[in-house]
Structures are given as structure tokens and as C-alpha cells.
Image: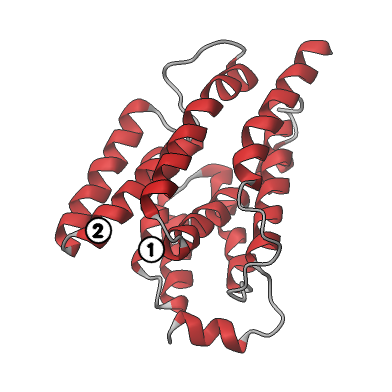
Amino acid sequence: MNICDVMKNNKVGIDAFTLKMIAAVTMLIDHMGYIFFPQYIFLRIIGRISFPIFAFLIVEGFMHTKDVKKYIIRMAVFALLTEIPFDFAFEGTFDWGHQNVLITFLFAILAMYIDRQYKRKIGIVAAFAFAFLAEFIGTDYGMFGIIIVMIFYWNYERFYNKLIFGTASLILLVSSYQIFDVLAMIPIALYNGKKGIGFKYFFYIFYPGHLVILYVIHMLI
């Protein structure tokens, strides 16, 4: 079934902005758990919901943007701006071995762009090349992150396939409490295809902003 047909039939559902808010809140809970309450694993479990939703929304953004090159540049700029807050929030210093998730998403967008511009075989090669690069330089979610984004992308017009393959991949590619990533498929399944409140820079601002705030709080207590 075409994704547009599914979305049109979903009169209630969840719009993109609401999905973004769910992902942002669960990410905040996850990061608070990691920094302040590492003994409470349930906070990290809640946080597993965020990444698949953001991965889904990255594909939505790519498919609907009027200028992919500007999308790539915007992601690259904010990825660079976020790296220092990311390092200090989680490590308390510069950490060249672990890069923020916006770099993962940047690689995924580049892979989607190559896939769109050239044949699918070249797109697949590009996707795996970026996946290995992400793993090599230590981006957040690494190879797994690229693969999940590309699964959503390659099944963009096949909504139910997206849910099925996305869920299967989350189960097969993760371990330990990461398995709770599959919970993200519930709000994704309720997506109604609507944009909602138009605040496209929300995540770009929220992501580094909340890391700075968490780092400052951590230094003060």
C-alpha cells in the first residue's frame, strides 16, 4: 500500500511535530539517565524510543525538502557545532573517539542523496560505505544508525514494509536493553503524514542546547 494512501486514511494519528517532541523528550530522559542516574536502567530503556523516530523523520525531511544540498549543509553545520557540547556532556572533555548523532544522520542523508542520483546498486554501496565509516569514526549509533535510516528510506512508499523491516532490523541489530528500540515503531505506525507545527530548526537547536544545559548542571552539582 502506498504510504500516501495510508496516511490519508489516518485521520487522527500523530503529526511530524508530535513525533519530534516524543523523540526529543525520550532522548532527554535517556541523557539525564546516562549523566545523572546511571543506576536507573529504565531511564535508558525509555530513551531507546528516540533514535528510530528521529531516523524516520530524517527520511521524511529528505523526501520533502525543496533543496537537498541545503539540507546536507544544515546538518553538517549543526553536526560540527554540536560536537563540543556532545563531548563535554558525556565525557567531560574532548573525545575524538565518539561523535554525535548528527554526523550519523549526515552520512545517512549523503547515502540517500547518492541513491537518488544514481542507480540503486550504487546507493547500496554508498550506504554500506557510510555505515562502515560511521562505525570506524565512532558516530553515535554507528553502522546500526545508517542501516535503520536506509531501511526507512528504501521502503518509503511501502508503509507496512517499513514497519515490518524496521521492527525486524531493530530486533536483529541490537542487543541488551537496546531491544526496546522497537517501542518506537508504535508512534511511527500512528504517523498521519501531516507536518504539524512548522518549527524545522527545533531539533537542531534542542540537541546541542540540552547537552550544554546538562553539562552545566552536572558541573554545578
Give the amino acid type for the residue marked by disc 1 in the picture.
Tyr
Residue drawn at x 44%, y 70% as measured from the top left: 162
Mark 1 closeness class: few <14, some 14–19, many ≥20 residues within 10 Å: many
Badge 2 element: helix
Q: How many marks?
A: 2
Of 55 and 118, which appears nearest the observer? 118
Quarter of the image where one finds residue 199: bottom right
Q: Give the labeled residue for mark 2.
A: 115
Residue 97 visible to the viewer: yes
Q: Residue furthest right?
A: 221
Query: Looking at the image, which residue is at 46% across and 65% down?
Result: 64
Q: In the rendered view, how is the structure colored? A: secondary structure
**N-terminal of the two: label 2 or label 1?**
2
Q: To which quarter of the image does residue 106 belong?
A: top left
Q: Which type of secondary structure does the marked residue at label 1 adopt?
A: helix
Three-letter amino acid code of the residue under disc 2: Asp
What residue does disc 1 label? 153
Asked if the residue at tag 1 contacts the one at tag 2, i.e. Cβ–Cβ closer than 8 Å, the answer is yes
Instruction: Point out residue 125 in the picture as x, y percentages from the top left corner.
Output: 18, 51
